[in-house]
Image: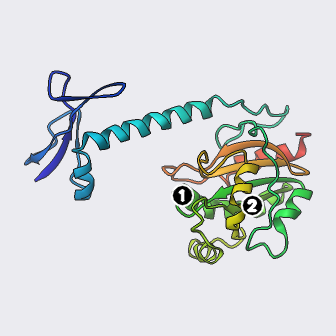
Amino acid sequence: MKVVYGIVGAAALCVGFAGGIMAAPHLFPQPAAVPGPGWVDLSELPEELIGWHTSPTYLKSEIATFEMVKEKMAAADARPKRVLPEGVPEFPGGVLYMPPDGAHWPEITPLGDPDGTLAAAREGGWTVLNLWATWCAPCVKELPDMDAAVPLYAAQGVTLLALNADPGEKDTLEGNTALFERRGVTRLQPLTAKAEDIDAVLAAMGTSRTELSYPANMIFAPGGQPYAVFEGLRIDDEAGIWATDEMIAFFKALAESEG
């Protein structure tokens, strides 16, 4: 028996929600296929989730979340784009945005950094700093790809670093080290922000615990000057982008430019 979720027409049973009308959900045994357009099979969901989809309150919450996400995405798209120097190719990893107001180099000493790699990167050339957390599936997925890119970027004068900054303060250096081992990550260091430094790290990236979106990346010009921000690998991407020839060519050209 299949359980299906149907959105019926306006003439059928509907419930009024603030800001509009949403058709009521119906769950019932369906011996054959999903009836047709507008119906979704929920049989694969846990029973608890199926039950939630019968609740107008739950659906109202889902609508509110969807609208909030749309607003945030629209605001993100409205950010000013980074204009690249002449001769630097288009960024192959998506859209480059200007750094948020107040962004700066994170003045912290993370765990897992016995040699002061983070501090040294500021005084070196260009740096790409990736913020991630273990609960972020795209973050974890792209780690091996980033790891492969480390020496390729270094050859162009660009340092690639991944800094775990879990706003929930659940991630640990030990856990991150074990994750790196499982994922075959050997070049990136498991840099882990201390709990008391989380807010400082997020502020340096121009975000906060309530506004962040992971994975987050910032490109710093020599001297630790914020240059641009971009999102990371999408979870539905089959191939990584970090170690591609296009990305290497981009950072090579950027490092050779005057920024």
Question: Percent x, y for residue 1?
Answer: 10, 53
Q: Residues within 10 Å of mark 1 (few under 14, many from 20)?
A: some
Q: Which mark is residue 136?
A: 1
Q: CA distance from mark 1 to mark 2?
A: 17 Å
Disc 1 to disc 2: CB gap under 8 Å = no
Using the rendered view, name the quadrant where residue 77 is placed: top right
Q: Is residue 45 something one can see in this rendering?
A: no
Q: Going 26% across and 49% down the picture, which residue do you hit?
A: 52
Q: Which residue reaches farthest left?
A: 31
Q: Going 26% across and 59% down the picture, which residue do you hit?
A: 46
Question: Percent x, y for residue 242?
Answer: 67, 54
Q: Residues within 10 Å of mark 2 (few under 14, many from 20)?
A: many
Q: Earlier in the sequence, mark 1 or mark 2?
A: 1
Q: Nearer the viewer, residue 58 or 189?
A: 58
Question: Percent x, y for residue 88?
Answer: 81, 37
Secondary structure type for disc 2: strand
Q: Going 85% across and 31% down the picture, which residue do you hit?
A: 86
Q: Nearer the viewer, residue 55 or 11?
A: 55
Q: Which mark is residue 161?
A: 2
Q: Is residue 146 something one can see in this rendering?
A: yes
Hey, what amino acid is under mark 2?
A: Leu
Q: Quadrant of the C terminus?
A: top right
Q: Which mark is residue 52?
A: none
**Lateral position of residue 159 relative to residue 170, left or right:** right
Give the colour scheme of this rendering.
rainbow
Question: Percent x, y for residue 45?
Answer: 26, 55
Using the rendered view, name the quadrant where residue 47 is placed: bottom left
Q: Nearer the viewer, residue 148 or 207?
A: 207
Hey, what amino acid is under mark 1?
A: Cys
